[in-house]
Image (spheres, rainbow, N blue to C red):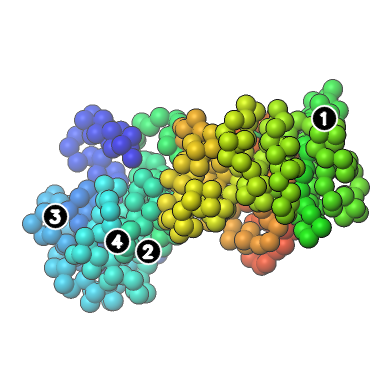
Amino acid sequence: METVRAAERALMARLPEGALMQRAAAGLAAACAELLGRVYGSRVVLLVGSGDNGGDALYAGARLARRGAGVTAVLLSPERAHGGGLDALLRAGGRAAPADRAEELVERADLVVDGIVGIGGKGGLRPEAEALARAVRHTRAAVVAVDLPSGVEADTGEVRGAAVRADLTVTFGTYKPGLLIDPAREYAGVVRLVDIGLELPVEGELQALQHADVAQLLPVPAAESDKYRRGVVGIAAGSARYPGAAVLAVSGALRGGAGAVRYVGPAGEAVVARFPETLVSDLGPAKAGRVQAWVVGPGAGDDAATVAEVLATDVPVLLDADGLRLAERDAVRGRTAPTLMTPHAGEAAALLGVRREEVERARLAAVRELAAVYRATVLLKGSTTLVADAAGGAVRVNPTGTSWLATAGSGDVLSGLAGSLLAAGLSARDAGSAAAYLHGLAGRFAADGAPAGAHDVAALIPEAWRDVRA
């Protein structure tokens, strides 16, 4: 967040005093008015801390008061409240109240604006701020957070103790990591970005790809292409106990842009019965024929020999599921070809030697650490999917997922899809990012508000692909 703070300081130095805060307040007031629908006669409560977020809330409250809203500012520290903002509110007909009236006022409010703590808040809320956060816990009013909900960490997405749960977060200049990464993301509600004129570098600490970005990554066959020029992906997956994992991984791979899919493993009959275009072998990876990338691990059981054999190849490898458990760390670290690891939180915790809760609490730190420790690109699956590589740089967060994707076999489809993109020539970072994006979009299309199976998700990858390219 230091990049954002530096950009704010640079802009404030060029603008008249208070102009930047007025820009933010104007955007905040407009969003609040839109949420209210009818401003005149509505009851608005501002929860105001001593920082700039409190000033934004006060100036926005003044704008709403001038439109006929009854606005009351609950001041956490009256002596440290933003002077100009408080004066503007009082001149517009608003009122100020002490913090001990917060619960009573919030109970009668139509809209609550959270301006308690800004992006500088670290380590959880102080006790007096916690009391204000608790006051909105059971409110029927709409809750709007200024820049980000108080109590969440802007840099990491961590939540340490009590935090405000917003229906809408109005953020300024750029999306903060805490608005994109769970657990903080679930506290932000709908996020609305207000452009206040910040000049920020293109490559930030966090990236969220959009349709246009992914469209540029997706492989398109040229006129002279054949199935081998488009890339061949090898799938070493499945077992007598889990043949379905092989079928689902192949289903994702066939829809991922590579020209052909080679399957190696004990589930060949099940694979061919479902997908007769698959090239099947039972002779092991070394004798399966030429491939441009391997996917190994989904449903593999205890077949450590196959995992080791695949890791010893000189082509990109995607490690998933049992492959993550069976792979030797040094075998992964010593590879010269790209490696893409796709753990969920439990698998990531086992790889790092920590509890699952630690990974879920600090997903951004976990994915970065895994990438550094294993010298690999890591796609951390879950409520927010993150992609990091060993070189550092921006971590990518996938914006297309849906909770309906939390279903058996969904990860196998993702692995096949990402492996196919690797074989088609994408880097591990781009293959993981594009696959997560398409997979999430296909999950949305498949579910459409109702349960969907992994095979439904795989079937709609082409529709997601077309949607992105259109």
12 or 372, which is in the foreground?
372
Tell me if residue 131 can be seen: yes
Q: Quadrant of the N terminus?
A: top left
Instruction: Kindly report the distance in space between the C-alpha atoms of the residues bearing marks 1 and 2.
Output: 53 Å
Instruction: Kindly report the distance in space between the C-alpha atoms of the residues bearing marks 3 and 1.
Output: 68 Å
Is 84 situated left or right of 107 in this image? left
| Amino acid residing under circle 3 | Ala
Q: Nearer the viewer, mark 4 or mark 1?
A: 1
- Point out residue 387 in the picture as x, y percentages from the top left corner: 54, 41
- Point out residue 170 in the picture as x, y percentages from the top left corner: 37, 52
Instruction: Kindly report the distance in space between the C-alpha atoms of the residues bearing marks 2 and 3.
Output: 23 Å
- Disc assigned to residue 165: 2
Instruction: Kindly report the distance in space between the C-alpha atoms of the residues bearing marks 4 and 1.
Output: 60 Å
Q: Image quadrant of residue 109?
A: bottom left
163 or 189, which is in the foreground?
163
Q: First in sequence: mark 3 or mark 1?
A: 3
Secondary structure beneath disc 4? strand
Q: Nearer the viewer, mark 2 or mark 4?
A: 2
Look at mark 3 in the image and give the residue it sits on: 81
